[in-house]
Image (tube, coloured by chain):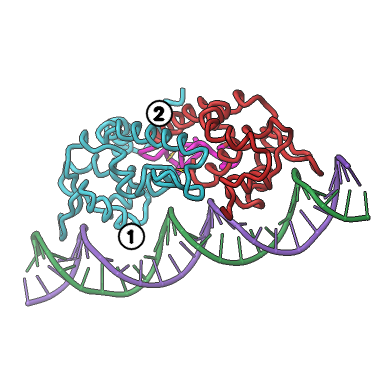
Chain colours: A cyan, B red, C green, D purple
Amino acid sequence: MRLTTKGRYAVTAMIDLSLNQGHGPVTLRSISQNQGISLSYLEQLFAKMRKSGLISGTRGPGGGYILNRDVDRISIADIVVAVDEPLDITECAGREDCQDGRRCLSHGLWSELSDQLYGFLAGISLGELMRQSGLTRIREESRQVEVPSLADTA
Amino acid sequence: MRLTTKGRYAVTAMIDLSLNQGHGPVTLRSISQNQGISLSYLEQLFAKMRKSGLISGTRGPGGGYILNRDVDRISIADIVVAVDEPLDITECAGREDCQDGRRCLSHGLWSELSDQLYGFLAGISLGELMRQSGLTRIREESRQVEVPSLADTA
DNA sequence: CAATAACCGAGTAATATAGTTGGTTATTGA
DNA sequence: TCAATAACCAACTATATTACTCGGTTATTG
Ligand code: FES
Ligand code: FES
């Protein structure tokens, strides 16, 4: 599964794209500036997502990226899989042979965990995340006041 | 979270330990041979688990490792956390500051996913996994001498 | 006292991530 | 026509982590 900054960057960038695509294509430059992610690194991530069919790019002035599907029809799993490759955390990739050609003692566990993980991420759409962070976003847009209201930790 | 071979090794090794501790302490040498994991690497993993209080080691002939708690009171989360460090996959480690001092757009997602992940792994005990893989193992158990089926040389 | 086996620190090799550099297309609009 | 824009692309580097090795030192047993 390999849940790392890469996947986080991709999801964060896609949320940014969702929030801004109302005005037409969104440039990587703007995402880079908004989210503090290296432009070239974004290019690599977006290349993968484009190849996965999640987004389309248009060149030239006024160009940028747009989502190919509705925000509610793109899941977080789609994004993570696109940039991070597998969402299967078994070492054997399902072949049940990671220990000297045989199934290792913990295969069943990782297999089940992979399913759980996928189920969770596939069940959340970009749209949901976008709307959640919308509030935060709008405020920052108007004036950057500290936002202490995000207490889902409570 | 960083679910990698390291965590898999640790869990696999702990299942092996569970299955064999009936006869007293289990040596890393035997686990190394059974599971095909480097002895020195096992030592490093077991050092961490010892420091986490999951196991105890006794030196000298007849020595080895034993579990400090009942197999049903050790969760997979305990093991993974012990060797793999965090089960929190947020970049900010809960501080909500990973993007330029502020909470990034996807923080909520990773936070929730961490909880799910932890919940799942904390809900599975070593005992359950041990009993699941028990069938495979019992045959080998009856034969105390060399285990040809798992031998590296075959 | 010699074999065993945990314990320890420092190293190395391979791999992956994160990011850089230096381009080339394609599109726009001045 | 031309310059600016922005996607697109390949290859490279730097860093971190994983997985593993090496060379020991304790402690315990018979
Ligand atoms: S993870 Fe599938 S056999 Fe070990
Ligand atoms: S993951 Fe917590 S602020 Fe980004």
Instruction: Return the residue nearer the eye: A71 or B40.
Output: B40
**Element under disc 1:** helix
Q: Is residue C25 above or below residue B149?
A: below
Residue A146 shows in this picture: no
Amino acid type, mark 2: Leu
Which residue does the numbered mark 2 point to in the structure image?
A150
Amino acid type, mark 1: Ser
The chief SS type of the magenta part is loop
Q: Is residue B76 left or right of residue A82?
A: right
Spot occupied by residue A81 in the image (x, y as percentages of width and height): 32, 45
Q: Is residue B135 left or right of residue C10?
A: left
Q: Which residues are magenta?
A: B80-106
Q: Residue at x 54, y 39 (%)?
A: B86
Which residue does the numbered mark 1 point to in the structure image?
A40
Residue A147, by quadrant, is top left
Instruction: Return the residue nearer the eye: C14 or B14.
Output: B14
Could you classify mark 2 by the number of other residues whose Cα lies within 10 Å: few (under 14), some (14-19), or many (20 or more)?
some
